[in-house]
Amino acid sequence: MNNLFNYIDRPSPIHRLTGATKFVCLMLWSAAAMSTYDTRFLAILGAASLVMFKVSRIKYKDVSFLLSFTFVFLIMNNILVYLFSPLHGCEIYNSTTYLLPYTGHFAPTAEQLFYHLNYFLKYLATIPIVLLFVCTTNPSEFASSLNKIGVKYSVAYSVSLALRYIPDVQRQYHEISQASQARGIEMSRKTNIVNRLKSASTILIPLILTSMDRIEVISNAMELRGFGKRDKRTWYMAHPFRRPDIVCMIVCAILVVIAIALNIINGSRFYNPFMQI
Amino acid sequence: MKKLSVKTIVATGIGAALFFVLGRFVAIPSGVPDTNISVQYGLLGFIATVFGPVAGLLAGLIGHFFIDFSFGWGVWWSWVITSAFVGLATGLITSKLKVDEGEFAGKDIVWFIISSVIVHFVAWGLVAPVLDILIYSEPANKVFLQGLVSAGVNSITTAIVGTLLCVAYAHTIPKKGSLKEED
């Protein structure tokens, strides 16, 4: 199984930003991309995110596994939207332009295709940023950055524990599942749902019981080292903010303002090139 | 606010990791498209029952956040908050159960099942659709239908898987007073 939170350590300007900056920027950027459907704005965000990908020196093959997954999801969603409401675009843009002489329910319209383009752009504007965050942020720094933006350190520590143990739990799940399959427990599509649920729980019980032991061991170790004695703690991975950090956060904040302004100017969340004046 | 115990913090972290792995890789299709049987809610019920509402709330929040995150389609806040709510509410209702002292039989099981059914119906039938409408302005009939289907599926899974887990865990803990002095 692939590790999903694969931090890739390469020297780049993006890696040098603090985790707190990247987290704040990610939140602001997704807020900006989510709040509007303005095609021009989304296209700029998408192009910018691809440029940043280049700057971060993350290579395509590092993320191809994640990307292929997202791509399938994107295609599926587009097909579903088209099947369920092939005239969704016409409703949004209040006009209908048939592209072919055929004008049935499923006839392609310029509005519908434009809507799908927007849908695609929305993904293009957000997914590279999410991947960028995942690949360039050290998990331990992520926890310290949560603490920095005001989350209590005990909660931040839970997050970092979760990140630390996801690969372990994943590996253990895989081992137990293989062991059960070797003993003849059917987990695949060949059997019915009730049986699959049953066999899932035969994996679950050893997995949970070993995890309970693990909780015991870790909390004892932390208690022995005096975790939680003080109200504050320092972080080994924490960096102070520098100029690029502040610039990035300001730029992302401006993006949110632009997105909101565009929504007001356009009169809705959509940019409408089909409007007749 | 009372300081969180170290055990709660660790349980939250590991609970979130388990929630993530189960939610991400153990999707069992229920036959209806887009609705998977989510084994992770059984786990969440278990964590909330054993370690309390705070651990439940945070494990649901963090775990669900990571699931959405790793799929790369952005974070669907209304459902993340609903998961957190499930953890919190289950933890509060079941706080009188003493699974961590090895007691889970008869009445306790009935209480656990009834409370998780109630929690899931409130969460997916009410909290999630209302948040969907508030945050994403989705059509009401769609989200309430979706919500009721998930409520049904999730409460059944939680009742089955959660109970199995609680029973199994309670068995591993020696009960108070189970040792007797030899005459």
Image (spheres, rainbow, N blue to C red):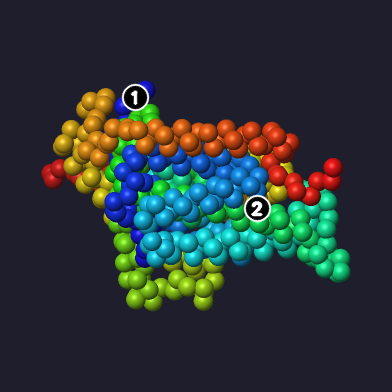
Categorize mark 2 by other alpha carbons within 10 Å: few (<14), some (14-19), many (20+). many
| Residue at 32% in and 33% down | A242
Alpha carbons under labels 1 and 2: distance apart: 48 Å
Q: Quadrant of the N terminus of chain A?
A: bottom left
At label 1, the amino acid type is: Lys
Q: Quadrant of the C terminus of chain A?
A: top right
Q: Nearer the viewer, residue A175 or A135?
A: A135
- Residue at the farthest top position: B1
Q: Is residue A87 left or right of residue B167?
A: right
Q: Which mark is residue A118?
A: 2
Pinpoint residue B53: horizontal percent, then vertical percent.
42, 35
Q: Is residue A23 left or right of residue B158?
A: left
Q: Nearer the viewer, residue B79 or A36?
A: A36
| Residue at 22% in and 34% down | A227
Q: Nearer the viewer, residue B150 or B96?
A: B150
Q: Is residue A215 something that shows in the picture?
A: yes
Q: Is A183 drawn above or below residue A202 in the view shown?
A: below
Does dot 2 land on a helix, a strand or a loop?
Answer: helix
Q: Which mark is residue B2?
A: 1
Q: Which mark is residue A26?
A: none
Q: Is residue A123 left or right of residue B182?
A: right
